[in-house]
Structure formats: C-alpha cells, structure tokens
Image: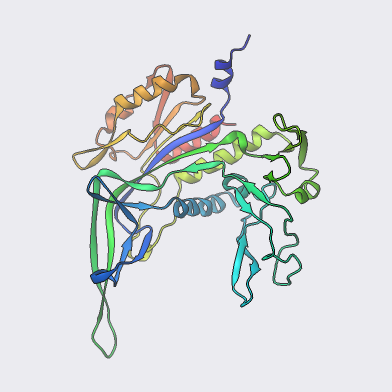
Amino acid sequence: MTTIKEIVKRKTTHINGAFLIHAPSSFLNGAGLGSGEDKNTSTVKSFWYNKTRVPYVSSQAWRRWLRNTLIDQTGWPKSEIEAIGWNNDGSTNKVAGKLDPITYPEDDIFGYMFASGKDVNPKDERIKRDHIPSEQLVRPSAFKSSILRGVDGLISVTKDQGFVHLADDTPLPYTTEFYAAELMALFSLEVYRLGVFEKKGKVSQELDPYLKEKHKDLIEVKEHPVYSNGEIVVRKGDLVKYQNELASALVKSIARLNGGAKMAQFGTSLNPSLLMVAGMGVGVIPFEHLISNDSGKPSLNVEALKELIKDYKDRFTTPFYIGVLRGYLANDEEVRNLGEVEGVTIVVDTPIQVAEMLAKDLK
C-alpha cells in the first residue's frame, strides 16, 4: 500500500525558494522626496531594524518586474491593466487586468480581484473590452513573496550630490540616496492551484462564469470536493503538464529578473547572484536564516541548511538546487562540496542553470 508520506514525497505541490541580488551602488525602488532639510532628496525605500537602516524593494515592485520578465521571456499574452470606471469629472476610478486566467497565464499565477458596482457601466463607450464581469471575482495569487530587503551586516546607505546645469543661470543642486547591499527575497509558488479555479457557494468565486462558456472547449467542470453548492473549474487537457509549464517559466524568469528604478544613474543587474530553489510537497519557505555576513561577503550557513533539509527531507520532490555565481559567497567551495544531505541531493551551478534543471525535473 502506498503511504501518505510516499504520495507527498512524489507530488510537487509547491516551488519554494529564495534569492539574493548583488546591489553594489543602487536605487531600485524610491520612496519619494525627503522632508525638512532633505526635501530635495530622492530617497530609497527603507526601514529601521536593530538600529540599522535597511533598504528594501516592495514586493509590489519586484513582482511587477517579474511579471514583465515573464512576459518578455515566454511571449505569453499580457494582461494589460485598463480603465473600466470613471467618476463624474472624467477621472479614472476603477481599473482591472483581463481577469481571464484561461487565456492569460499571468492572471492565473498572480491572481486578481474585481468587485462590480455602480462605478462600472458595462455600456460605457470608453471601455475597450467586450465583457465586464457582473459578479465579484477573487483569485488569490498562487505566487507568494516577501519584500526584497537588505541582508543584516551587508548594507550601506549614502547620498549622491548632483547639479542641473542651466544655460544662463546658477546650477540647481539635487540629492539622490543610493545603497550598497545584498538584497534577499523569499518566494513560494502553489503549483497545485495553477489551472484550478474554485467557486465556494454563491459569493466567492475565482473564475468569471462568462468564461466557462467562452472557453468551454478548454475547461471541464467538476463538483467541488468540499462545498456541496459549489464547483471546481479545471483547465482541460493535461493539467499537470500545464502546471509544470507555468512553474518552470516562473522559476526561469526569476533567474533572469530584470527591471528597477533609476537605471540610467545606478544601473544594477537584477539577475540573482544566488538562487536557492526546490520542488516540495509543502508550502514553507524556511530559508530566512541561511544567509549571514562573513567579512563583508554573504555566506551560506551550511549547518543551518543541513538542519533544514533534515526537517523537511520527506517533503522534497526534487534536488535542492543552489545557483550561485562563483566567488559570490565567502564559503563558495564549502557550498560546492555539499553533495548530498539526509538523502536529498544538493546540486550547485549558476542561477540560470539550476532554474533550467528544475524546469526539466517538472516535466
């Protein structure tokens, strides 16, 4: 008899990981102008932790970079955000993406929320789309992520003094903050939810009923296993193949991440210098405490990694992949010699190569 443990170990329900970006002199996400004496200073987003100012990139910002990278890498149709509601003075007061996860994989992965109401008139000639949902839609994102924040002990924030030189007058000064930091983010993709859209009762649903008719040749409708008055709408065809295709594309796009603010002044490569990722049968992201400062360089805590793998060894469905640029970690050779821990294979290569390897594992 197949045990529950064997089933869980075999089935990849989540792709869990973390990555680090080397930002040696960067301004990736702004917080606007400072106040008081700094009112002419463009400031970076930051927060205070243990008396240290920690720069960060909001999850909204880097998720947008990821969405753009994903569309650029795959050629998938883009779920453009459009105005669908206007107030009395003609200003936009409601926007929405395509809200169609069958046609737009981007909507499937990142989700959406739509509430119909008086501020949306489906007959308004300014609306460019053919259909506006008449019911509330809530599709929680299948992709979970943290902010992209500076690693303790590997942060320095400073200012750049500049001038706008006028042809016939005194140059005008301006100031821009920037930082040197190693930025870390955690992520988890709920693979099992891709291509699966629920309706729980009469109110909460993920898929517009209109799309069930429009895409009836691409989906199948089944009874919901929990809610007697609801249903599950599943994309037709090989669902596992579809889920793995989307998961593979997302991981490969993380390894090739591109975007960021003020690139003309502080150009920074967003391709991760370190990417840790694995297929798992559980939705945990236990990588928060694996990175530390070692004489001014990031270091991977190998003993903590071994403990992590020991705790979750029965939940890994793929090797544990470590993609790292050679020389980036202070203990580079120690990491490359890991080999195997508690029966879990550790594969070390470049970030882009391990993303490609994981994609092959999911096929």
Question: Is residue 39 left or right of 270 when viewed as pictured?
Answer: left
Horizontal and vertical percent for residue 288? 36, 36
Camera-nearest residue between 263 and 172? 172
Q: Is residue 6 above or below residue 116?
A: above
Closer to us: 278 or 116: 116
Q: Residue at x 60, y 35 (%)?
A: 244
Residue closer to the observer: 49 or 315: 49
Image quadrant of residue 177? Answer: bottom left
Residue farthest along the bottom direction in this orientation: 168
The colouring scheme, among rainbow, by chain, secondary structure or one colour, is rainbow
Q: Is residue 151 left or right of residue 348?
A: left
Residue 132 falls left or right of residue 29: right
Q: Where is 157 relative to 6, above or below? A: below
Quadrant location of the N terminus?
top right
Q: Residue at x 29, y 88 (%)?
A: 167
Q: Which image quarter holds the C terminus?
A: top right
Residue 147 point in image, percent of width and height? 41, 47
Q: How many marks?
A: 0
Residue drawn at x 59%, y 41% is: 246
* Residue at image point 74% right, 56% down: 134
Q: Quadrant of residue 43?
A: bottom left
Q: Residue furthest left?
A: 295
Q: Indicate the position of residue 127 as horizontal and vertical percent values.
A: 70, 68
Percent position (x, y) of residue 158?
23, 59
